Image: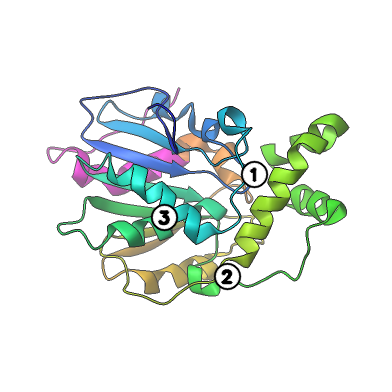
């Protein structure tokens, strides 16, 4: 989709719905590169690319999450010529929520769903008290696990990755919710069954942020359950989006 905040790895011009995906802290758009293979032709996957990584490696990092949401929203608004759902994992869930808030005033809203994954509700986000120096970032990454822990195995790669990780962790840690009107689209909050950082009780707090439907779901795995069971996650998303895709019947996820 060209330069800017959004990447489409497999364009689907005839898609009925766009699924706009927001990576976790330290993550990149490529985390969603394989998702089109799990989704039917009716869905086009669009991934957000934060600065300072992959094809945006040379760009300055952004430290303010709400300012970043302002910038992302400009690009998102340009592709809302059809219904869209937002999926955000960990820090990406808050970024997706803040973008959804900025789109919401349009009526009828083109946003049909927000999927908030592995991150506490905006009003429940609290500072960790960490300064995220090298040792604290290492410990945090090790505790979360998943593909984000790969740089720990290579010191040179770690040195390249550390500034981005530290920036993103601080950006998420410094985020503070500003009260406002709830969303008018449904929210599904998704947790990993073995994730101590985001429990089923944490997921239920997202209910206060929408006047539409709410559901809390859990899937097998830890904080990065999305990497462990991507097929199950995509099937869950499709289950919730079915009415927006094909009124004649359920759209099944493709596994493989």
Relative to residue 71, is residue 101 drawn left or right?
left
Residue on which the image places disc 1: 26
Magenta region: which residues? 233-256
Of residues 177 and 248, the one drawn nearer to the viewer in this rendering: 177
Q: Earlier in the sequence, mark 3 or mark 2?
A: 3
Q: How many marks?
A: 3
Residue on which the image places disc 2: 125
Of residues 219 and 162, the one drawn nearer to the viewer in this rendering: 162
Q: Image quarter for residue 35?
A: top left
In the rendered image, the quadrant that contains the N terminus is top left
Give the number of the mark in front: 3 or 2: 3
Q: Position of residue 96 (x, y in %)?
A: 43, 53
Q: Of helix, strand and loop, which one carries label 2?
A: loop
Q: Are marks 3 and 1 in contact (CB under 8 Å)?
A: no
In space, the residues marked 3 and 1 are separated at their CA atoms by: 20 Å
Residue on which the image places disc 3: 70
Give the number of the mark in front: 3 or 1: 3
Above or below — where is 13 with respect to 152? above
Q: Position of residue 83 (x, y in %)?
A: 22, 44
- Label 1 neighbourhood size at 10 Å, few (<14), some (14-19), many (20+)? many
Residue at 87 percent across and 53 percent down: it is: 135
In space, the residues marked 3 and 2 are separated at their CA atoms by: 20 Å
């Amino acid at each position: 989709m060209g330069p800017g905040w959004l990447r489409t790895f497999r364009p689907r011009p005839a898609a009925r719905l766009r699924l706009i995906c927001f990576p976790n802290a330290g993550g990149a758009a490529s985390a969603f590169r394989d998702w089109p293979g799990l989704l039917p032709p009716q869905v086009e996957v669009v991934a957000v690319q934060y600065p300072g990584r992959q094809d945006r490696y040379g760009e300055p990092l952004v430290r303010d999450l709400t300012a970043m949401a302002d910038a992302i929203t400009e690009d998102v608004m340009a592709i809302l010529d059809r219904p869209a759902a937002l999926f955000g994992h960990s820090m990406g869930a808050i970024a997706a929520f803040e973008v959804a808030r900025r789109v919401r005033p349009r009526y009828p809203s083109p946003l049909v769903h927000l999927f908030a994954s592995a991150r506490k509700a905006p009003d429940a986000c609290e500072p960790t008290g960490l300064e995220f120096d090298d040792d604290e970032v290492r410990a945090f990454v090790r505790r979360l696990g998943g593909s984000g822990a790969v740089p720990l195995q290579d010191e040179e790669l770690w040195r390249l990755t550390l500034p981005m990780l530290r920036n993103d962790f601080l950006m998420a840690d410094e985020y503070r919710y500003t009260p406002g009107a709830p969303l008018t689209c449904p929210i599904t909050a998704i947790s990993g069954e073995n994730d101590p950082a985001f429990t089923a009780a944490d997921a239920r707090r997202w209910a206060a942020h929408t006047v539409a439907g709410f559901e809390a779901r859990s899937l097998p795995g830890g904080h990065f359950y999305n990497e462990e069971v991507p097929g199950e996650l995509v099937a869950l998303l499709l289950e919730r989006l079915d009415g927006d895709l094909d009124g004649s019947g359920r759209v099944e996820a493709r596994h493989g």
